[in-house]
Image (cartoon, rainbow, N blue to C red):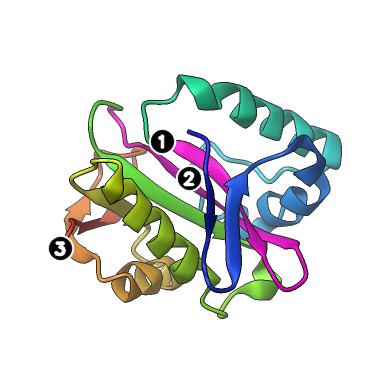
Amino acid sequence: MSLELPTDRLLIREWQLDDAEAAQRIYGADEVAHWLTPEWRPVNDTDAMRAVLHAWIEAGPNLVPPAGRWAIVRKEDEELVGGLSLKLLPPFEEDFELTWALRPDVWGQGYATEASQAVIDWAFKQGIEEVFAVARPNNKRAIAVARRLGMEWVGETEKYYDMRLQVFRMRPT
């Protein structure tokens, strides 16, 4: 779903093919890829990242609204610092998962929380009744973001991605 969403410090926007080099610094970083879905492997070159972005861009119109994948750009210098997605959780029927990934050199600056809150607020305006985030039990950073967002812990499961995950949920207030 097409989106351009500003926050105080960030702009959440559609991915572009010329984002490949900057995106590769996110999705090619071992310390980021380690926490993504089990089938994800670090994207080790710009051409491969461009192919991934192309696939994401092409798939966008076919996603169940309001699902999408977006770039996170820092307003002050127009640097691409991360990515977000809102997508259906397996078995891909009704539960929407919010994911975020940031360049390791910008971790700890609140960008994941700021961007995620904006997308959650937007998603609720689109009619979603709840948003989930899942994290591996030892992914302290992701769990901290979910908690800062005010997401409630709803338990632990192995039904998503064939691995044990902490599940967090937020509903509109």
**Mark 2 Cα-neighbour bin, 10 Å: few <14, some 14–19, many ≥20:** some
In this picture, is 123 found above or below 139? above
Res. 67 mark: 1
Horizontally, is 58 left or right of 38 in the view?
A: right
Does residue 44 show up? no
Nearest to the observer: residue 77 or residue 102: 77
Residue 126, image x, y percentages: 30, 41
Res. 173 mark: 3
CB contact under 8 Å: marks 2 and 1: yes
Q: Is residue 81 magenta?
A: yes
Residue at the location (30% across, 73% down)?
A: 147
The magenta segment is 68-91
Which residue in the protein does label 2 denote? Answer: 85
Horizontally, is 149 left or right of 37 in the view?
A: left
Q: CA distance from mark 3 to mark 1?
A: 21 Å
Residue at the location (68% across, 56% down)?
A: 26
- Residue 50 in which image quadrant: top right
Kind of residue sitting beneath label 3: Thr
Horizontally, is 45 left or right of 158 in the view?
A: right
Residue 53, image x, y percentages: 69, 34
